[in-house]
Image: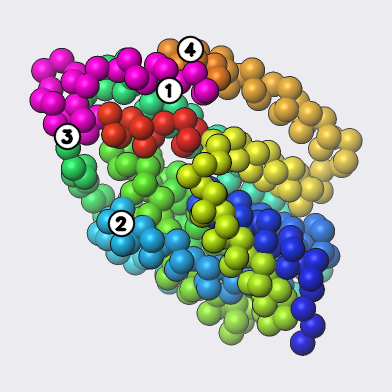
Amino acid sequence: MTLDPLLTIASLGIGIIVGLTGMGGGALMTPMLVLFFGVPPLTAVSSDLVAAAVMKPVGSMVHLRRGTVNLSLVKWLCIGSIPSAFVGVLILNRLGSGAAAQHWLQVALGVALLLASAGLIVRAYLRLLERARRLDGRAAPLPPGPPTVTVRIWQTVLVGAVGGIVVGMTSVGSGSLIIIALMAIYPTLKASELVGTDLLQAVPLVASAAVGHMLLGDFHLDLTLSLLLGSIPGVWIGAQLSARAPGGLVRRALAFVLLASALKLLGVPNTATGIVLLLALLIGPPVWFAARRRHGLPAFSGRLAQRSSAVPDRAPGATSEAGTGTRSRVTEAGDAAL
């Protein structure tokens, strides 16, 4: 068994990003293995999923202790995701490990990364809208305590099933695509509850996909150990830095990296890739600043704290306790989440 020190160092950096943002593990680790280390796509997916099955429980247990997990949602998501993740592995196994199958998997991974990059942008914009509505009083005041959530069973099971197939086939989606769907179905969930619920449901989801890949995929123990040696301390370091680092900036950088990886996996020529990325760098920030100003927020988030201090403790007709709940939710869903 041979460990790769360079791969361990690279996975350390990715682990830090995962600890900072709560997402991006499979979306970064798998393309890194394929693009920079020349690992075949099927082997990359298999090894990354097994490594993720070891890492995922760490963050989810923190959220479980803090009470930021909706266990009912976790149950219905798992009912859909656990069997479908194994189905995703079976589909890969039926495709075989030939050159054509590896190319098809690489294309599927590129599409999944494009969706993950778009999902990060959508998530940031939804948080921006939520922030603006709370600040200008257009949104109804929030009651104190955790919000009441009516579980939509079939929609939740469907999200888990679709997410499970995507994760089983590409290792991408457990921390990016599913959380976007949860935001759309359950808009009243707090940011911390969205992340906590998504992290906990991802544990059995990724475990199911990992078992499938260990039995039917192309799992390599030395490759997985190299990933774990770097990613586990990286996740811990990232978690320690998460309270001080600009999470919104990290997530936007992550979306950019996912876009670049997706274009390369899809075989886009270097010149075209460079043009797309340059346009994203030049156009993205002005569009984002314009969107913030359009919704009554300052263009740069550094000025938002001054405005937040001017928000009254009570919305018209709300009790002081409700006002306090509103302010705490505003703080939690603030620019750090954008």
Q: Nearer the viewer, mark 2 or mark 3?
A: 2
Point 46% across, 37% down: residue: 337
Circle 1 SS class: helix
Q: With respect to residue 68, does 246 lie above or below? A: above
Point 82% across, 30% down: residue: 275
Labels 2 and 3: the sequence-earlier one: 2
Amino acid tagged 2: Arg
Q: Nearer the viewer, mark 1 or mark 3?
A: 1
Kindly identify which residue carries mark 3: 143
Point 55% across, 20% down: residue: 300
Q: With respect to residue 153, does 308 lie above or below? A: above
Circle 3 SS class: loop
**Residue 40 on the magenta segment:** no
Residue 332 at x, y = what percent? 36, 37
Q: Is residue 91 left or right of residue 333?
A: right
Residue 73 at x, y = what percent? 29, 56
Mark 1 residue crowding within 10 angstroms, few (<14) / some (14–19) / many (20+):
few
Labels 4 and 3: the sequence-earlier one: 3
Q: With respect to residue 140, does 238 lie above or below? A: below
